[in-house]
Image: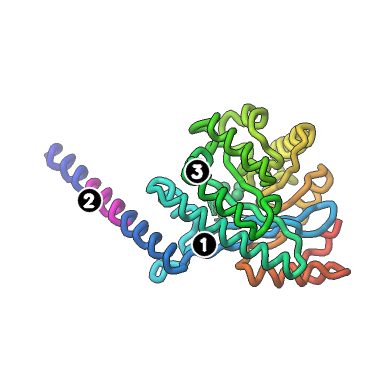
Amino acid sequence: AEQAQAAGVFWRRAAADLAELERRVSLMGELDEALRAGGIEVYYQPKLAIAEGRVASAEALVRWRHPERGFVGPDLFIPLAEQTDRIGPLTLYVLERVMEDLAQLRALGHQLTAAVNISAKLVASAEFNQAAGALLARGVVPPSVLIFEVTESATLEDPDAATEMLRAYRELGVTISMDDYGTGQSTLTYLRELPLSELKIDRSFVQHAHRNRNDGVMVRSTVQLAHELGLKVVAEGVEDEDCLDFLRQLGCDMAQGYLISRPLPAPALIEFMDRNSGEAGGGMLPTSLGG
Ligand code: C2E
Ligand code: MG
Ligand code: MG
Ligand code: MG
């Protein structure tokens, strides 16, 4: 009886695994279709330059509007895209959109920079880097208005190749930013080795920094470390005014989070910038954001 039960468990698991596999395979086929037919959208989350009280940059965050499943978030499909070699085409699509949207924003007088998330696999991929280089060379916007966000794990796979590629982008004028700082491994090694200009403190440290002593200590010492290394610091996941005040006191350079804005589609970002770039700063940014 015990054996029969074990076999039952085995087959139920196998069936569940198979269903999961099938779900993934169909999801990836649909992602190919979305890339061809336009179901992939790029949203932008503004980053506040804290001391100046203005938005000078935004992070591009990919969104998939699936015809039946509705909204599919990046946490679900980015890992699948990475595992199935679709992350290259997806990232090139995002990069191209970002360059076009930035060109439009700049034509409207908004001198924004924009950040693109670059996955682990891609940083050391010759194929991707060649294609990205060709895209940058088209000159839709200068590379100096772009930021590439990489995670610590991005550089783990092949540190030498990663470092070399990041240097090449930096020589073109692209800003290299370390994303989700504090959550990975060998953090200090990468701070020493990589050609970084910016560091983004992970939201898990930032969110409670103003009311949790340990989190606060870590954010403060990270800001100090980064500054002494000549890096700009962005705090992710800023959700309330007290948190922003705390960051301002620490001299943190930029804040990103729901307090400033949720990620917005390009037309809404343009409206947001229009509203907040007037003499008085417009009406949307919370009053304390002006510094
Ligand atoms: P990330 O690069 O660390 O992006 C920040 C994430 O935090 C975004 O989630 C953003 O919507 C969310 N967020 C921003 N402010 C707040 C806040 O105040 N509170 C909370 N709770 N969350 C906040 P999203 O858009 O779901 O993206 C998740 C992750 O997916 C990103 O983390 C990034 O690693 C990845 N991702 C997104 N777009 C791309 C892309 O185009 N390429 C690649 N390779 N990865 C991407
Ligand atoms: Mg990011
Ligand atoms: Mg992040
Ligand atoms: Mg993240």
Badge 3 is on which residue?
A: 122
Q: How is the image coloured?
A: rainbow
Is label 3 in a helix, a strand or a loop? helix
Of the 4 image quadrants, the one containing the C terminus is bottom right
Q: Earlier in the sequence, mark 1 or mark 3?
A: 1
Position of residue 275 measured from the top left corner of the image (x, y, whole percent): 77, 71
Of the 4 image quadrants, the one containing the N terminus is top left
Badge 1 is on which residue?
A: 63
Q: Residue 155 or 285: which is nearer the viewer?
A: 155
Badge 2 is on which residue?
A: 15
Residue 249 found in image quarter: top right
Whether residue 178 is situated above or below residue 107 in the rendered picture: above
Q: Earlier in the sequence, mark 1 or mark 2?
A: 2
> Label 1 sits on what residue type?
Arg
Q: Earlier in the sequence, mark 3 or mark 2?
A: 2
The answer as to whether callout 3 falls within 8 Å of ligand 1 is: yes
Structural crowding at the residue carrying mark 2, measured as other residues with C-alpha within 10 Å and reported as few (<14), some (14–19) or many (≥20): few
Is label 2 in a helix, a strand or a loop? helix
The answer as to whether callout 1 falls within 8 Å of ligand 1 is: yes
- Tell me what residue is drawn at x 56 percent, y 59 percent: 96
